[in-house]
Amino acid sequence: MGKYNLNLEGAEIDEIILNKHGDKIEISADDASLFDKFANGFDEIIKMADGMPEKMETVEKEFEGKEDSDIQKSVAVSRVRVEFCEKAIGIIDNIFGEGTAKKSFRDGYEAIPDFLPDEDMFIAFFEKMTPIMEDIFNRKMERQEKASKARMAKYQPQDHKKPQRKSTK
């Protein structure tokens, strides 16, 4: 009976510092779902942001011409914004792990316990995170290319040739 040791290397982990307090997240390009989640999350945030003017216009029309409706209109506008921001927190935490949004906007949460970052803060988060993700992805692609070349270098050209038929003459 033989004894075998696979001894695989672990995932390469990247650390991203989120704030001046040193709170961080750890991610890995070796997580097959990371880039898909990031791209989908970013797209969802953009779609939500693009839909905000239409939602605000709907609220405006709902209260147009009504007397004493300023407070109700403000509450309705606030609800639209809160919905966006709560969804954005869920998107960020789904991509990078639970609590990422709170870590990212820690100063606001420390000053105001029920703080809710606004739309601009989420857009800024994705704008700053995009080049980081691109760099991580590019490094992953370079590692894969080098590994592929190293694997292929093990094989000699004759390993890939079709067997030659011997002449029967």
Image (cartoon, rainbow, N blue to C red):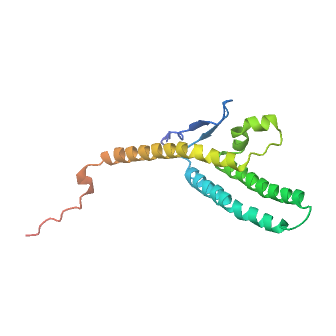
Which quadrant does the C terminus fall into?
bottom left
Q: In this view, does 146 lie above or below 23?
A: below
In the image, 78 versus 5, the foreground residue is: 78
At 66% from the left and 34% from the top, the residue drawn is 19
Instruction: Decide if residue 3 is on the left or right side of residue 53.
Output: left
Percent from the top left, x then y, of residue 56? 75, 61
Q: How many numbered discs sit on the rendered protein?
A: 0
Furthest-left residue in this view: 169
Relative image position of residue 47 (x, y in whole percent): 64, 60
What residue is drawn where x is 78% and y is 46%?
116
Pick the front one: 135 or 82: 82
Q: In which quarter of the image is residue 114?
A: top right
Residue farthest to the bottom?
Answer: 169
For the residue pair 149 and 105, the one nearer the viewer reads as 105
Residue drawn at x 63%, y 57% is 46
Q: Residue at horizontal 46%, vertical 42%? A: 139
Taking the image as shown, residue 110 lies to the left or right of residue 158, namely right
Using the rendered view, name the quadrant where residue 61 is placed: bottom right
- Considering every residue shown, the one lying at the far top of the view is 21
Can you see residue 105? yes
Query: x and y percent of residue 111 in the render?
Result: 80, 34
**Residue 36: percent from the left, percent from the top?**
57, 55
Is any atom of residue 29 visible in this view? no
Position of 21 with respect to 12 (left or right) is: right
